[in-house]
Amino acid sequence: MRERNLITASMKFTHFVFLLVITLALLIEPAISADQVIALKAARLFDGKSRALTQNGVVLVQGDKIVDAGANVAIPPGAQVIDLADATLSPGFMDAHTHVTLDLTNYQAARLRELQVSTSAKAYSVIPAARATVEAGFTTIRDVGARTYRSHDYLDVSLRDAIAKGIVIGPRMFVATCGIGATGGHFDDSAGFRDGLFGPEPDYTDGIADGADAVRKTVRFEVKNGADVIKAAVSGGVLSLTDEVDVPQFTPAEMAALVDEAHRLRKKVAVHCHGDQAGREAIEAGADSIEHGSFLKPETLTLMKNKGTFLTPTLLAGEYIKGKLDSYPPALQAKALAAFNTRSDMFRNALKIGVKISFGTDAAVFPHGQNAKEFKLMTDLGMPPIDALKSATANDAELLGVSQKLGTLEKGKLADIIAMPGDPTQDITATERVSFVMKEGKIIRNGPATAAPTKTAARDVLEEMGADF
Ligand SMILES: [Zn+2]
């Protein structure tokens, strides 16, 4: 009996030692991997701020940070070397204008789907979109409006947090919840439906506000619910049924309240704006960026230049809509064409005047993951390729207020690093073929992308309807 007790005791001790060793190993193991230096090598390097590429680029990464970057940086012994050969290293791209929780690639299907699906069903359907975006090299996005009609589940907030926790693979997100707009304006989802169909008029809880005090309350409400940035529709839009595309939708007093309240709460203000009058008033009120800007006149662009307001041109959205114009309702076709016909001159004028350009695409209007196609549209209209690259790195970092941590390949910055084949200053479409993505020191992709899902959210609804597409 005693012997048995002794055996049991010795077994318990062995067991204890075994568990102790395992525990120590687990405790020590991450420390070792965090100390491990990863050396990324490529024929060229774009650092996010210089006007020329660096030859023989090397970036050293330790943990989640860059510890050195430049030409022919000495690689410490024991470093894990990843040689990307004839490629260009770059800071992770940023897109200052996405709607990653939405799929508007088929307008009619999207409109029906909004009325049918639950927020949780929508949440699952956006996981591939988040992944496609980061795998395309966009390690940071500003997601400027994620409303689900008459639902107060903030899908962008929960997706942002799920990505930050590592539950879902996707870009770092800065989100706007619903965004803020006026009754009957671009953000009023009940416009175009029979009055009263969905119960009472939408209010601040739906991001709809009229009057300066109501606007302030809505800013506070959105920040309370997780908004990192305030988005407002200050002029009409293309994909809304009952407004004119360029009319002002907030008064100067409402805009002043919007910007003042947002800035007091240390949030930037991004305004959806096509029209010139609304643009001028928003810039005067102190908005941080004008999104779209289709009808902005040279005088208004000069005001932007003087005030340091960013322009986020979203050329790709207009391009995509124009490519399949027939699939939109006639009222929207006319608005899309009007905006499309002025935006190229507006963009050329903005370049000439020297307005700060932030890279943004309006992803959701076109399929997620194709964001980089914006680069070619920018350079086709006369933007030097190096400036287009800067718009998606250092400029967006400045607009988002994260220049201390992101946007350039420099010692101490977070290790968001991508690589694309060849030289993007010679062939800008190289940005569409990103083959290596690291986010905060973790490799998300080195080689082929994850296969895109065969279904998208919009196709799902069309299939259910038995529609021909
Ligand atoms: Zn948008």
Image (cartoon, helix red, strand yellow):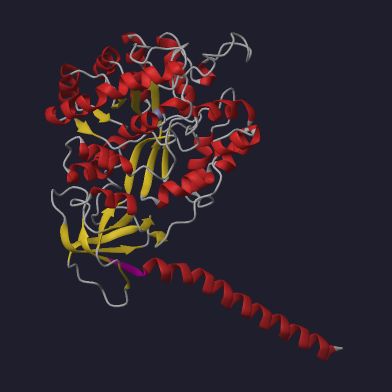
Q: Relative to 418, say whether 248 is above or below.
A: above
Nearer to the camera, 37 or 460: 460
Q: Is residue 101 magenta?
A: no
Point out residue 287 in the picture as x, y percentages from the top left corner: 29, 23
Residue appearing at x 22%, y 51% in the figure: 427
**374, above or below 71, in the image:** above
Q: Is residue 8 left or right of residue 286?
A: right
Q: Is residue 125 visible?
A: yes
Residue closer to the observer: 33 or 281: 281
Query: Residue furthest toward the front?
Result: 468
Q: Position of residue 340 (x, y in %)?
A: 30, 24
Stretch of the chain drawn in magenta: 36-40
Residue 293 can be seen, yes or no: no
- Position of the C terminus, as image quadrant, is top right
Q: Is residue 254 above or below residue 8?
A: above
- Which of the 4 quarters of the picture holds residue 380? top left
Q: Residue furthest right?
A: 1
Please tell me which residue lies in front, 48 or 382.
382
The image quadrant where one finds ligand 1 is: top left
User: Quick check: 76 left or right of 254?
Assistant: left
Front-most of residues 196 and 71: 196
